């Protein structure tokens, strides 16, 4: 019998995250949710992304508890991974260590603020769409 919904263990979830570079960051401000698309890099224990000063960083500075989600859809499978944690601005030493990583952004303007999400929880699911 085919199992259609399967939980992902932590290693599987990180493996899926490492295969992608685009996800969604969820923040909260004055009790209201907000979601931002971000290019990201998963290193196996944290999520990192680049940004510039503005609304997203103002929200993180006001309430660093965030959720991050990435997913993928194919003809026969769908996976989704959600990381809940705390977003912090990276210090210069940490930025220097990842600056050479494949850490790109779609937006043409400079993204000189590096943010790291330190997970408190990671969950994932794999949905088998084949019949």
Image (tube, rainbow, N blue to C red):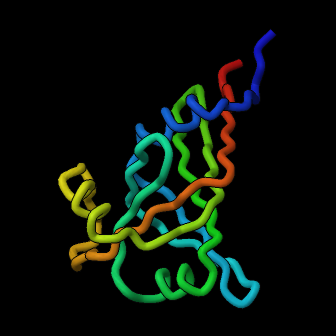
Is 52 positioned to the left or the right of 54 in the image? left
Which one is nearer the viewer's eye here, 115 or 24? 115
Q: Quadrant of residue 97?
A: bottom left
Looking at the figure, which quarter contains the N terminus?
top right
Query: In this rendering, is residue 5 above or below 105?
Result: above
Image coordinates of residue 5 in percent, x first then y, are 76, 29
Is 18 positioned to the left or the right of 31 in the image? left
Image coordinates of residue 40 in percent, x first then y, are 40, 56
Q: For the view shown, which residue lies furthest in the right direction?
A: 1
Is 39 positioned to the left or the right of 62 in the image? left
Which one is nearer the viewer's eye here, 104 or 128? 104
Image coordinates of residue 52 in percent, x first then y, are 34, 81
Q: Residue at x 71, y 18 (%)?
A: 131
Q: Residue at x 67, y 27 (%)?
A: 129
Query: In this rendering, is residue 75 above or below 66?
Result: above
Query: In this rendering, is residue 45 above or below 93?
Result: above
Query: In this rendering, is residue 12 above or below 19?
Result: above
Which one is nearer the viewer's eye here, 7 or 117? 117
Q: Residue at x 65, y 57 (%)?
A: 84
Image coordinates of residue 2 in percent, x first then y, are 76, 14
Q: Quadrant of residue 8?
A: top right
Numbered disc total? 0
Q: For the view shown, which residue lies furthest in the front direction?
A: 93
């Amino acid at each position: 019998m085919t199992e259609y919904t399967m939980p992902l263990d932590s290693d599987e979830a990180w493996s899926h995250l490492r295969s992608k570079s685009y996800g969604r960051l969820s923040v909260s401000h004055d009790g209201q949710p907000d979601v931002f698309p971000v290019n990201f890099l998963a290193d196996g224990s944290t999520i990192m992304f680049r940004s510039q000063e503005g609304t997203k960083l103002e929200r993180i500075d006001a309430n660093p508890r965030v959720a991050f989600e990435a997913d993928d859809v194919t003809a026969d499978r769908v996976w989704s991974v959600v990381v809940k944690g705390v977003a912090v601005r990276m210090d210069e030493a940490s930025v220097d260590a990842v600056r050479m990583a494949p850490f790109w952004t779609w937006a043409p303007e400079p993204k000189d603020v590096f943010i790291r999400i330190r997970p408190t929880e990671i969950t994932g699911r794999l949905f088998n769409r084949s019949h």
